Structures are given as C-alpha cells and as structure tokens.
Image: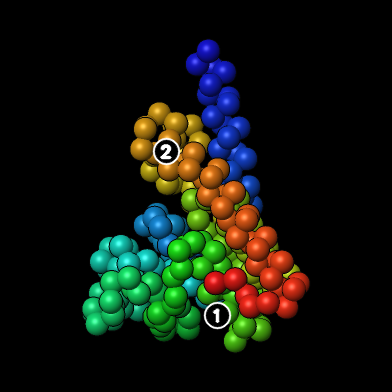
Amino acid sequence: MLFVLKRLFARIYDWLAPCDAVAPGDLIFTLAGRHTRQVFALELYSQGIAPILLLSVGRYEIRRFAQLVLPTALDLTAVAAPVPARQRHYFVALESGKCTPTRTPRGYLGTLSEMRALGQWLQSRPSIGSVLIISSAFHLRRVRACARSLLSPSLKIRYLAVPQDGSFNRADWWRDRSTRGVVLKEFPKLVVYRLALMCKTLRSKGGGPASR
C-alpha cells in the first residue's frame, strides 16, 4: 500500500513540475516566495549562464535578502523602509556590475502579477530573446500558464526547478503535513488562475480593458 501511495504522490509532483534542463540564456528570472529560489538563481548567474539576473523579492523576503551574496551590495531594507508594507515588492536587476531595485505592483494573484510585471520589464529590453524562469518545482505548471498568456510568444523560455528546496522534494513532500498542504493547494490555485487568464483572453478579444 505504501509503495502505491509513493508512486501516486510522485506522479502528482511530476505533473505539477514540468521543468527543463539548465541552458544558457539572456536573462535569469526568479519568482518570489522561497529563499532557495534566489540562492539557486545566484549560483547560475555566477556561473555565467546568463548576463542578467532579475530577482523578484516579496515583502516578507526583504530582510532575508541581506543574506544573499551579491556582486554589488544593496540595502533593500533601507530602500523599502519608506514604502507601505503592502507595496513592498521589488524587482532587483543584476547586470554589468550594477544592482538596481525597482518597485513593482503585486496583485491578489501573485504569480500572475509577477509575470505581468516581467512582461512590462522586458518591453524596454527587446534584445532579450530567451529567459530562464526559476521557481519551486511544484509551482512550475502555474508559472507556465501565466507566462504563456502574458509574455511574448517569440520569447524562448526555459522553466527551471530549484534542485535543493528543503522538504519540498519529490520523494518526501507528502510526509510533512504543512508541506503536503502547500503542494496540494496548487490544484485549486491552478483552477483560479486558469479562470483569470481565460477572462483576460476574452476581454482582450472583446476589446475591453486588460485584466488586472
């Protein structure tokens, strides 16, 4: 019985985690949510996988941001201090020895908001033709859905899973109640996101305002 359950849980995880292999690109982008994502992104950036790194940093990650080993120091806590707590979401770009924070809007659907903001960020950088998007493995199917709808179809995207993500690994995620709850919540979230993206598509075809 345990063997059957293990196989079932592995298949659930694999379905949620359609990831690609690491390959060079023009930009590395990591979604907010878990510190391990930023650590992995910095590892790839330091290896020269891409010349630009863009870190999405949520309000609860700002203090821990100081623990990252950046090529250029940035006191993001001081940058965010004057900003109301709910508006403290930043894109931090590392490029050519510079570290540049930009405050970006964060909506109710966080991943959708981040993909929309990434699309807007890329509009002023037409030379970027390929992006490596990093997140936790179980998050990638939802990330893919948002990226396909909100990013340019000409953009080459690879979806990378964090290899060392604590208890959120393929073999053991179901053993811990808290971890299991986070992973299984991806299913209702996927339904909500697909409905939101469908509404956006219908509004766009009807000439109405874009979904916010």
Question: Which mark's residue is nearer the viewer, 1 or 2?
Answer: 2
Instruction: Name the kind of residue labelled 1 in the image.
Output: Trp
Q: Nearer the viewer, residue 189 or 36?
A: 189
N-terminal-most mark, 1 or 2: 1
What residue appears at the point 48 percent right and 72 percent down from the top-left corner? 54
The Cα–Cα distance between marks 1 and 2, rounded to whole angstroms, is: 33 Å
- The disc at residue 121 is 1
Q: Is residue 29 above or below residue 174?
A: below
Provide the secondary structure element on which disc 1 rests. Answer: helix
* Residue 133: mark in rendering: none
Question: Residue shown at 60%/39% (left/top)?
Answer: 14
**Above-or-below relation of 93 to 19:** below
Chosen colour scheme: rainbow
Task: Name the image quarter holding the C terminus.
Answer: bottom right
Q: Position of residue 120 (x, y in %)?
A: 57, 79
- Left or right placement of residue 8 versus residue 129 in this view: left
Q: Name the side, left or right, on which 121 lies relative to 59.
A: right
Residue at label 2? 181
Residue placed most toward the observer, 189 or 34: 189
Residue 107, image x and y in percent?
Answer: 46, 68
Query: Secondary structure beneath disc 2?
Result: helix
* Label 2 crowd (10 A; few <14 / some 14-19 / many >=20): few
Rendered residue at 28%/76% (across/down): 84
Give the quarter of the image for residue 208.
bottom right
Residue 37 image position (x, y, % from top left): 44, 57
Residue type beneath disc 2:
Gly
Q: Residue pushed farthest top?
A: 1
